[in-house]
Image (cartoon, rainbow, N blue to C red):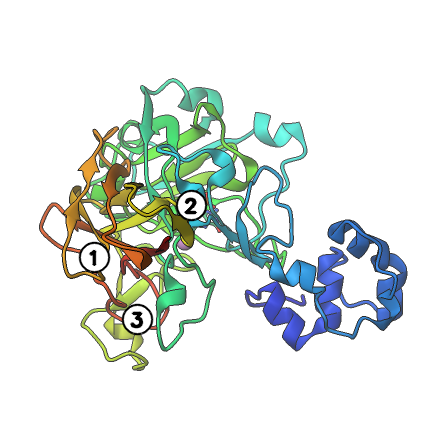
């Protein structure tokens, strides 16, 4: 297989332009440049929306600038305005100003795949879908989708953020998807409590951790390899807001988000919310599936100097995510009329905790204005907030947002604890405002 590690299109273009061109065409492996232009010229023209009269002169390895400059060189079906960070596996984030909805619509929900989504084109795959619950249980279960629907139904707004959201802000840089701010979402999910299902299976006293398995394929395409299998301590699995869901915003889960079934572990790294869920393995020890061990989704047990090599034995699994906020209106870079108040709004969330306040600054942190928080939909929904700010004169301003959680911890202004894989960057979000 050609792709062992994750690799973005731009990176690929630098290293292996012919392969990149082949990837654009979805041909999967290297083809000759001559062939590329024979088969590819028309595809490229379609993507650009225009013929390329001098196609033959386009230097090897030059991604047409019209594609390189746009944040979305590929259309992801069902998505609107997302920035593609990697196309294999697919990873795409939502620009902050497109996350303005109080409840995230499906077309604005970020996508984070570690492998290849399962092929569900055969209706029998869905009709025959089962969820297995085994391991440290008295009565192993194999539930059909209909059987799952018989548990008490729950609908909740739940916030899920990728553990690597904000990675782009770390220095020295960490490898992996360079998420900026947009790998977070808070849609309304419908499903059942994981707790109710685990109780039907009857947890043994040895039940300590969960291990979730989805139906997606490893990047190599090898059906014997699992792209990701993570879980949580049993207490989080039994928490009332941890759900097995089949609907997002009142509609069947979109394919990219785990149709027909996914787990949602709100407030914890998104990687514990396994999509295309088919098995829950109750463990008598900390789960050791792919991406549970080593450096994956782990941070040093103590603060380290940026760039330090940390031994694996000193890495601890990330649990609750830190307090964070986002300014979703207005879009950064606007010009605002002098003398008029500017409405600023956004969201804040705090892992397992709640948000106690959100403050804004227009003077680079010297003074702060407390934002008004709207009523919280339910625990683990994000907290919508809004306020209006007045600027004393014309000029360049930044609006900074800082959330504080229920135990008094605030977002840092600068990069928080550096860690080898670049997780948990909850530095404040800021937008630029020109007042004229
Ligand atoms: N089966 C499966 N579940 C998965 C993943 C995956 O690659 N495969 N990615 C995880 C990660 S790292 C994140 S952040 C979330 C992203 O969910 P989304 O793609 O619905 O936004 O899904 C998690 N669940
Ligand atoms: Mo993630």
Residues at discs 1 and 3 in contact (Cβ within 8 Å):
no
In-front residue for pair 410/270: 410
Residue at image x 84%, y 70%? 33
Name the secondary structure under disc 3: loop
- Answer with left or right where residue 204 lies relative to residue 118: left
Query: Which numbered dot is residue 419?
Result: 3
* Direction from residue 123 to residue 215 in the image, left or right: left
**Mark carried by residue 411:** 1
Mark 1 closeness class: few <14, some 14–19, many ≥20 residues within 10 Å = many
103 relative to 267 in the view: left or right = right
* Labelled disc at residue 97: 2
- Which quadrant of the frame does ligand 2 lie within? bottom left
Residue at the farthest left position: 407
Q: Which of marks 3 and 2 is in front?
A: 2
| Helix, strand or loop status at disc 1 | loop
**41 or 152, nearer to the observer:** 41
Q: Which of 390 and 248 is in front in this view?
A: 390
Q: Distance between the residues labelled 1 and 3?
A: 17 Å
Local packing at callout 3 (Cα closer than 10 Å; few below 14, some 14-19, many 20+) is many
Residue in view at x 54 percent, y 41 percent: 256
Residue 27's spot in the image, x, y percent?
77, 58
- Distance from the alpha carbon under mark 1 to that under mark 2: 20 Å
Residue at position x 22%, y 34% in the image: 379
Q: In this view, does 100 lie above or below 91?
A: above
Quadrant housing the N terminus: bottom right
Q: In which quarter of the image is residue 133?
A: top left
């Amino acid at each position: 297989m050609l792709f062992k590690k994750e690799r973005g299109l731009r990176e690929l273009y630098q290293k292996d332009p012919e392969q990149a061109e082949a990837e654009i065409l979805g041909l999967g492996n290297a083809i000759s440049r001559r062939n590329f232009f024979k088969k590819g010229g028309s595809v490229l023209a379609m993507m650009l929306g225009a013929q390329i009269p001098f196609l033959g002169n386009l230097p090897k390895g030059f991604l047409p600038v019209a594609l390189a400059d746009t944040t979305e060189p590929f259309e992801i079906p069902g998505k609107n305005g997302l920035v593609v960070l990697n196309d294999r596996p697919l990873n795409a984030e939502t620009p902050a100003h497109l996350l303005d909805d109080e409840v995230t619509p499906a077309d604005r929900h970020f996508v984070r795949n570690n492998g290849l989504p399962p092929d569900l084109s055969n209706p029998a795959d869905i009709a025959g879908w089962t969820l297995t619950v085994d391991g440290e249980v008295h009565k192993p279960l194999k539930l059909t989708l209909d059987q799952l629907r018989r548990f008490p139904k729950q609908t909740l707004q739940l916030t899920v953020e990728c553990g690597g959201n904000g990675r782009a802000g770390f220095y020295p840089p960490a490898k992996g998807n360079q998420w900026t701010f947009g790998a977070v979402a808070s849609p309304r999910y419908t499903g059942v409590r994981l707790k109710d299902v685990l109780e039907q299976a009857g947890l043994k006293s040895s039940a300590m951790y969960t291990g979730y398995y989805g139906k997606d394929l490893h990047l190599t395409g090898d059906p014997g390899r699992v792209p990701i299998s993570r879980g949580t301590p049993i207490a989080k699995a039994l928490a009332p807001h941890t759900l097995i869901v089949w609907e997002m915003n009142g509609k069947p889960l979109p394919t990219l988000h785990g149709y027909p079934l996914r787990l949602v572990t709100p407030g914890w790294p998104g990687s514990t919310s396994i999509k295309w869920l088919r098995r829950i393995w109750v463990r008598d020890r900390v789960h050791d599936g792919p991406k549970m061990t080593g450096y994956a989704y782990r941070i040093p047990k103590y603060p380290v100097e940026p760039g330090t090599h940390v031994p694996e034995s000193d890495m601890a699994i990330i649990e609750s995510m830190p307090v964070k906020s986002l300014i979703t209106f207005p879009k950064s870079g606007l010009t605002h009329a002098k003398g008029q108040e500017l409405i600023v709004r956004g969201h804040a969330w705090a892992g397992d905790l709640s948000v106690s306040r959100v403050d804004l600054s227009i003077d680079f942190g010297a003074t702060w204005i407390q934002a008004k928080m709207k009523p919280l939909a339910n625990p683990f929904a994000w907290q919508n907030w809004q306020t209006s700010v007045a600027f004393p004169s014309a000029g360049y301003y930044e609006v900074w947002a800082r959330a504080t959680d229920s135990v008094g911890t605030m977002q840092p202004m600068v990069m928080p604890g550096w860690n080898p894989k670049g997780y948990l960057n909850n530095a404040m979000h800021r937008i630029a405002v020109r007042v004229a």
